[in-house]
């Protein structure tokens, strides 16, 4: 849940590949993922963000916000949940 809140601030996110991070971050487009037990990947992601120009930082931040407002709004989440229930119940 904290990643969703962070994305609302329109900032690039760097997160480990655990939990819901893979679901909410599109690598290089809306943030950066690193393997949770690999500090070198974390360092690489940090260096990448440090070296980005302001336009690219803004682009990644905006993409992250756009992604969560589209994918995780109430209506989209309800539709997704309903589709999953229908699949489980084999309802067309």
Image (cartoon, rainbow, N blue to C red):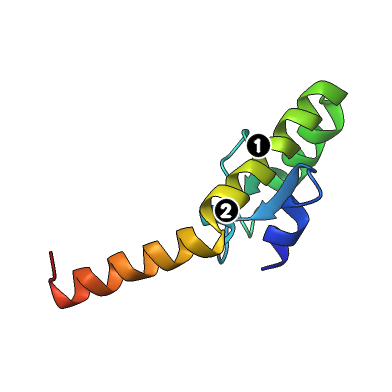
Please indicate whether residue 34 sits to the left or right of residue 77 in the image.
Answer: right
Name the residue nearer the viewer: 50 or 67: 67
Query: Is residue 5 in view?
Result: yes
Query: Going 69% across and 54% down the picture, which residue do you hit?
Result: 15
Q: Name the residue rendered at 73%, 51% in the picture.
A: 7
Tell which circle, 2 or 1, labels the residue nearer the N-terminal end: 2
- Quarter the C terminus occupies: bottom left
Query: Would you name the residue on which mark 2 appears?
Result: 24
Q: How many labels sit on residues?
A: 2
**How packed is label 1: few (under 14 Cα within 10 Å), some, or many (20 or more)?**
many
Residue 85: give its label.
none
Residue 89: name its quadrant: bottom left
Name which residue lies at 20% across and 68% down: 87
Residue 31 in sight in this render: no
Marks 2,1: beta carbons within 8 A: no
Q: Which residue is mark 1?
A: 63
Please state the horizontal and vertical placement of residue 22, each as a whole percent of the image.
53, 54
| Left or right of 76 in this view: 9 | right
Of circles 2 and 1, the one toward us is 1
Name of the residue lying farthest toward the bottom: 89
| Percent x, y of residue 66 | 63, 42
Choose between 59 and 85: the one closer to the eye.
85
* Picture coordinates of residue 55, whole percent (x, y): 81, 22
- Which image quarter: residue 40? top right
Would you identify the image quadrant in which residue 18 lies?
A: bottom right
Q: Residue at x 73, y 48 (%)?
A: 14
* Percent of width and height locating residue 88: 20, 75
Quick one: label 2, few (<14), some, or many (20+) residues within 10 Å? many
Give whichever of 62, 2 is nearer the camera.
62
| Quadrant in which the N terminus appears | bottom right
Q: Secondary structure at mark 2?
A: helix
Q: Is residue 1 above or below residue 45?
A: below
């Amino acid at each position: 849940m904290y990643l969703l809140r962070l994305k609302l601030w329109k900032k690039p996110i760097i997160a480990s590949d655990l939990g819901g991070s893979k679901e909410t971050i599109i690598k290089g487009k809306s943030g950066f993922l690193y393997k949770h037990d690999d500090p070198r990947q974390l360092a690489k992601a940090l260096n990448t963000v440090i070296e980005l120009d302001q336009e690219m930082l803004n682009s990644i931040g905006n993409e992250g916000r756009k992604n969560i407002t589209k994918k995780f709004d109430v209506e989209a989440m309800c539709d997704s949940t309903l589709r999953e229930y229908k699949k489980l119940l084999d309802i067309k």
